[in-house]
Amino acid sequence: MDRALIVSGSDKGMEIIAGFLHSYHYTGIASTQSGSEARRLTGSMEYSLIIINTPLVDEFGHDLSITLAENTNAGIILLCKADIADDVSDKVGDYGVCVVPRPMNRSMLHQSIRLVEATRSRMLGLKRENSKLMVKIDEMRMINRAKCALMQYLKFTEPEAHRYIEKQAMDTRSTRKEVAQKILSTYEL
């Protein structure tokens, strides 16, 4: 279930956007009129799409979009008047916020939502890949620390330490990381 948050200073704009999102796959739709309430809502709930219809009751909305882009994984669309859209886009573009000028038609909003969804999907894939790589790097660091401990305390050469860890992993049917943890628990305090 994809959740969406609508932040709009006008009730009419909120109703139009909510009606549009209901025709999509967004079933959990929350709405608010203020930026401070939007910050509170995003702190307690994960949204896949946030649409900000400027201006809001307590701020314009571009600072909110930057804050949400930095602190959430949501795709963010900022709606503003056409005459200031380029200036606003210059301020928020580096944060991955999609600026859509008003007045707009359903087709333009539809395309913007699809673009933001595709970008968000790619970003989440890159974050998953980054997490896997960070785990792998931590594992490699631990194994290298274990090699250094073997070299320091047992006077192994680097190839001998590497071979020892590999052989222990095969003989005990455990991972190199588990062998490294045992070595480190023995030699490091």
Image (cartoon, grey):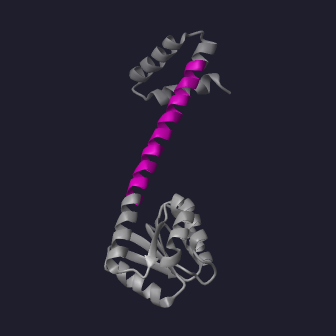
Where 185 falls versus 49 (above or below)? above
How far across and how far down the image is residue 38, in percent? 56, 75
Can the viewer see residue 181 in this picture? Answer: no
**Residue placed at 59% from the left, 65% from the top?**
67
Q: Residue furthest bottom?
A: 12
How far across and how far down the image is residue 119, in percent? 40, 59
How far across and how far down the image is residue 168, in percent? 45, 20
Q: Tally the marks.
A: 0
Residue 98 lies left or right of residue 111; in this view the side is right
Q: Residue furthest front?
A: 83
Does 142 appear in magenta? Answer: yes
**Residue placed at 63% from the left, 22% from the top?**
187
| Res 106 → quadrant | bottom left
Which residue is more in the foreground, 161 or 109? Answer: 109
Where 119 falls versus 51 (above or below)? above
Does 51 appear in magenta? Answer: no
Where 176 falls versus 36 (above or below)? above
Residue 149 lies left or right of residue 169; in this view the side is right
Magenta residues, start to end: 120-148
Where 116 falls versus 128 (above or below)? below
Which residue is more in the foreground, 175 or 15? Answer: 15
**Residue placed at 43% from the left, 54% from the top?**
123
Can the viewer see residue 138 in this picture? Answer: yes
Q: Main secondary structure of the magenta part?
A: helix
| Image quadrant where one finds the C terminus | top right
